[in-house]
Amino acid sequence: MEERLYDLIFICMPTTPEEDIAKIIATLEQTATERGGKVEKLEKWGTRKLAYRVSKQREGYFVYLSLRATQGELIKELERRLKVTDAVIKYMTIRLDEEMKRQQKLAARREQRVRKRPRRPAGPSSGSSPAPSPGPGPSPAEPAAAAG
Amino acid sequence: MSETHSPAPRPHSGPPREGGGGRPGGGPGGGPRRGKRQFFRKKKVCRFCVEKIDFIDYKRVEMLQPFLQDRGKVLPRRMTGTCSRHQRWLGVAIKRARNIALLPFATEL
């Protein structure tokens, strides 16, 4: 099965000591590697304000993980672990590989287009009049249409 | 940002906007209308198209914030000028950010 890219974010209670957070991350990483996944990126965003109250908290400690997995079972297990951890107040997993694929496709297409016609003379981007009017100001370039 | 929901050819009786009310010469965004007073309106362009962004990252809140109203609603395309494709992606990104408490569903007072 092909590899999938996931984003996993979880929020801990702001009162959680650093060691506990490190422990949670360590268990997650271990679980991921055990089941054939790989943690690509790990970012601790630290304590941030929450946009709304979660478990009566207004702040939370954010941890962001980017991981690759071949089977959805791993995500299930990670989410189960986060669910049973008391310090974690919120978590979210997003599958991103399809969007990344789309992004690469678009970027490739754009590059191809640029290569196809290199340095096209910059025409008037807006408006149909070919007159070189300076700036988007109210130019008298189209008197016939406006005067009526 | 001015609203653009009145394409009717009659004189617009709304409040005078920037650019000194009506001008006989139509701006680039207005289009030719017959002999009526018109408002000069700057043509809005999709910010994501200009910056050539293919993926709107939900994690970058400061990038999403300008597309939200004060209370947390998503701004419509007619306000921001975003193209339809990017508006769709933007909606997805905002919803993701809301889900993980990076953006509010509704700001409480």
Image (tube, coloured by chain):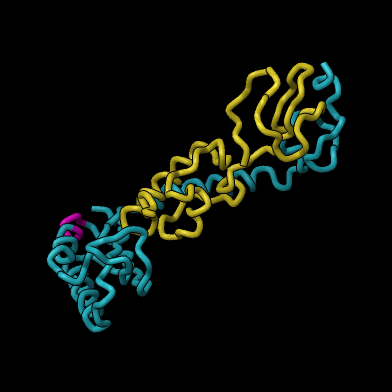
Chain colours: A cyan, B yellow
The residue under the point 62% across, 38% down is B2
Magenta part of the chain? A71-75
Compared with A43, B108 (above or below) is: above
**Residue sitting farthest toward the front:** B109
Residue A32 left/right relative to B81: left
Camera-side residue: B24 or A83?
B24
* Quarter of the rendering containing residue A40: bottom left
Q: Position of residue A60 (x, y in %)?
A: 31, 69
Name above or below for residue B88 compared with residue B13.
Answer: below
Q: Is residue A54 above or below residue B87?
A: below
Nearer to the camera, A143 or B53: A143
Which residue corresponds to the image point at 20% horizontal and 56% vertical from the top-left?
A71
- Magenta: main secondary structure equals helix
State the residue at coordinates (41%, 55%): B58
Q: Identify the image quadrant of residue A5.
A: bottom left
Magenta highlight on residue B13: no
The residue at 81%/22% (across/down) is A146
Quadrant holding the C terminus of chain A: top right
**In terms of depth relative to the viewer, which is nearer, B66 or A71?**
B66
Question: Camera-side residue: B88 or B2?
Answer: B2
Specify whether residue A63 is in view: no
Q: State the image coordinates of residue A108 (x, y, percent, origin top left).
A: 52, 49
Is residue B31 shown above or below A43? above
Residue A105 placed where, x, y %?
A: 47, 47
Q: Is residue B55 left or right of residue B50?
A: left
Measured as percent of width and height from the top left, residue B68 is found at 48, 48
